[in-house]
Amino acid sequence: MRSTSLNRLNRWAVLMIFLITLFTFSYLNTSREKAEHVRKTRIAGILQQIAKDSSMYVEKSAADEIYKNVTVLCYILTMEANLDNKVAVVNTTWARRCNRVLYILCTGRNGPDILSTCAIGESKEHLTGKVRYSIKHIYQHYLNQYDWFLKADDDTFVVMENLRYLLSHYPTDKAGYLGYHFKLFVNQGYMSGGAGYVINRQALKQIVEWGFGGNYCREDGGDEDVEIGRCLEASGVSVFSSLDKFDRETFHTDSPWKHALGLQPEYLDEYSNNGVKTGADCCSQYPVTYHHMDEEHMLFLEHMLYRTHVWGRHGKSDMKDLFRPKEVHPREKETIYTNKP
């Protein structure tokens, strides 16, 4: 009799534990859903403000002029799950300053700014294939319409005015590309994919007509930035320096606070072609990109860059020597690793 009572108690205890666990899980899941809904609503409200607001006191004639003179097509890698959140923020902030933007993803949605890559596949393992497909598409449809072609991710933030100013120092008829320069795996190094990289019209022409035609880089798989770097090098495309005259970086692999505070990942010490700097020397006064930026951080950076100023202090737009254009020559062979770990 006692054993039967204990068995009943044990069954009741197990049942109570199950019910409490189920209730707790359901409560936490509901709380997360509510928090996410509140977050999305808040972001949507901010995006509406940015899109409609015309209350800023801004003199932007130089930015308007260089927008016309240095044209940039931006192609941005994303996925369908991010269209209504990350892409919405990108599209309302920095991407609207591109001369043209293409979002690269597998989707059934149609639009002039969407390039579907469902035939390639949608995963990290297919990034090389997606970028190659994008480059070929751009070559076929936009080669002669734009000067430069910027590859970025949907968690990259780009200061387009600064990018154009940097690019204005370089020709478009001599094949070259630039970004955050890594020194491994490719003889002349390659550009970090996350920090974004930009190739000029002649480089686009050569990589499609020469690089992709040979067996110089994978058609898919591997690491996208390494593989594209290999094909660019095989196509005779030079690396252009993206440093300013103080040897400060313009493209960045992480968020601005990580670079400024010295919190970058340790791998940069091994990968960086120019060496890692922190504090006041981390970043150019005219930065071009930051990476690993979620929606809130993008909105905050947009606010600080485009909606706040210090009275009486303005960055100059007529500097003559901030950027000193030069090609970056390959390092010694012993610094090159054959395979990425």
Image (cartoon, helix red, strand yellow):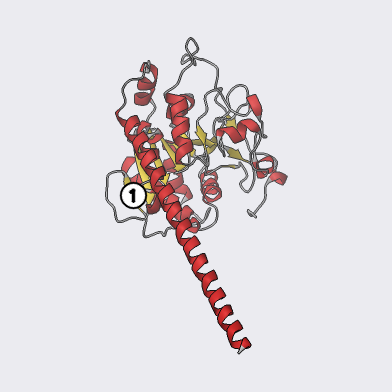
Tell whether 184 sits left or right of 53: right
Mark 1 secondary-structure assignment: strand
x and y percent of residue 197 in the render? 50, 39
x and y percent of residue 292 in the render? 52, 42
Quadrant of the rendered structure where residue 108 is? bottom left
Residue lying at 51% horizontally and 15% vertically, measured from the top left: 320
Q: Quadrant of the N terminus?
A: bottom right
- Nearer the observer, 213 or 69: 69
Q: Is residue 210 above or below residue 19?
A: above
**Disc 1 packing (10 Å; few <14; some 14–19; many ≥20):** many
Residue 84 in sight from this viewpoint:
yes
Quadrant of the rendered structure where residue 90 is? top left
- Nearer the observer, 41 or 317: 41
Which residue is under mark 1?
Answer: 115
The residue positioned farthest toward the top in the image shown? 312
Tell whether 247 sits left or right of 164: right
The residue positioned farthest toward the right in the image shown? 334
Q: Quadrant of the C terminus?
A: bottom right
Q: Is residue 28 above or below residue 2?
A: above
Quadrant of the rendered structure where residue 148 is? top left
Residue lying at 39% horizontally and 53% vertically, measured from the top left: 81
The residue positioned farthest toward the front in the image shown? 1
Q: Amino acid at mark 1?
A: Leu
x and y percent of residue 111 in the render? 27, 47
Q: How many marks can you see?
A: 1
Residue lying at 48% horizontally and 56% vertically, measured from the top left: 28
- Nearer the observer, 168 or 7: 7
x and y percent of residue 124 in the render? 49, 56
